[in-house]
Image (cartoon, rainbow, N blue to C red):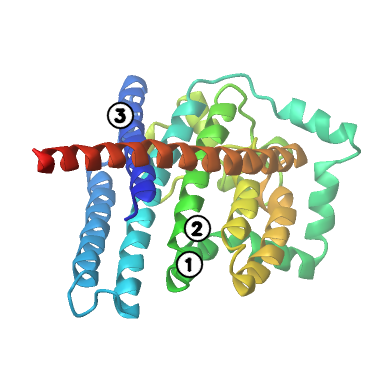
Amino acid sequence: MPWKTWAVFKATWILNCVLVVVDFAWGRQIGLSLRLSEIWWVASRGCFGLLVAWGLVLVSVNLKLSGTARGRFYHDSALGILWITSLAAFTCGATVLQYLSVSLGAPDISDVLISVDETFGIHWPLIYSAIHSNGALEMALGAAYDSLFLQMVLLPFVLIIAGKVEHYAEFVVQFMIAALIVVIIATPFPAESAFTHYHVSDVGATASVSDFSDFRSGRMRELSFGTMQGLVSFPSFHAVLAVLIPYAARRLKLLFLLFLPLNALMLASTPARGGHYLTDVVGGLAVALVSICMAARFVARQSRNDLGLAIAAGNGSQAASDV
């Protein structure tokens, strides 16, 4: 792994460790319960990913493969798996953190968000009714909204094959920064979902955000990684990813042309399918732009710092050899 990439990768794992400590300390304070078997499930798969990556690194440096296209592919695959593992670990920690943030019980700002929407003539119930009265439109937007998981799987796979692992590393850093910004904003300014606020009749929709009120009131304190929900309404993280995913694919024309319209549809589906206010979407777009800028500055700073250490180490080795 290049010096600058290694520095950034180390920083992501430092952040992951900090998240674990914060989640454990905060969770213990409020009586959070998370099954040991689930923690072991997550940890074991993370360790397996690291072992697979290490195995691919060993294969890639084999004398018979060194410098070959296959060797480079194995090397890129190893780096991709390392970044995937770091992002997976972060996602688990950040998801728990958003639940913990809800437990503070800060004043709900959904009325404020609705007021902002209505200032611009936007009425969420009308949008929801219009979309759900059109079967074809509802199906198209629903498919786009639900495509997020598939996009998250496809993105690293294609970037690895194309030899653009550094773009996925950039995406991981942007994702982490954006997620932290979203949780930091949502902690003092929580908002219940529009599904809940407007008492929509779709049981499936309201069930997807039910943990917000249960965790906020203290009725719920047991979590499961398999059933955790997205509790942050403002800013919308779906809106964030609708920008970050196409941005990560910007150097691959075909992938970009696939992701751009798909994420435009996902962005349009966020209010009705995700129960978000229009203000949530605008907030998510702003967070995405900020995270792109912050990630670029962070990577540049880490690169300079690590390059300085590398030069210092090289000079030290040269001085030792001269003696």
**SS for dot 2:** helix
**SS for dot 1:** helix
Residue 302 position (above or below residue 107): below
Name the residue tied to disc 2: 167
Q: Nearer the viewer, mark 3 or mark 2?
A: 2
Query: Which residue is more in the foreground, 62 or 281?
Result: 62
Residue 201 in view (yes/no) = no
Q: Quadrant of the C terminus?
A: top left
Q: Is residue 138 left or right of residue 107?
A: right
Inter-mark Cα distance, 3 to 1 = 32 Å
Could you tell me if the residues under marks 3 and 2 are in contact, i.e. CB atoms within 8 Å? no
Q: How many numbered marks have been drawn onto this rendered protein structure?
A: 3
Residue 278's tag is none
Residue 159's tag is 1
Inter-mark Cα distance, 3 to 2 = 29 Å
Q: Look at label 1 and name its amino acid.
A: Leu
Name the residue tied to disc 3: 21
Could you tell me if the residues under marks 1 and 2 are in contact, i.e. CB atoms within 8 Å? yes
Identify the residue at horizontal 62%, vertical 62% (top origin).
Answer: 250
Residue 204 position (above or below residue 162): above
Looking at the picture, how far across and down is residue 161, in whole percent? 44, 73
Where residue 195 sits, quadrant-wise, is: top right
**SS for dot 3:** helix
- For marks 3 and 2, the one nearer the N-term is 3
Q: Look at label 2 and name its amino acid.
A: His
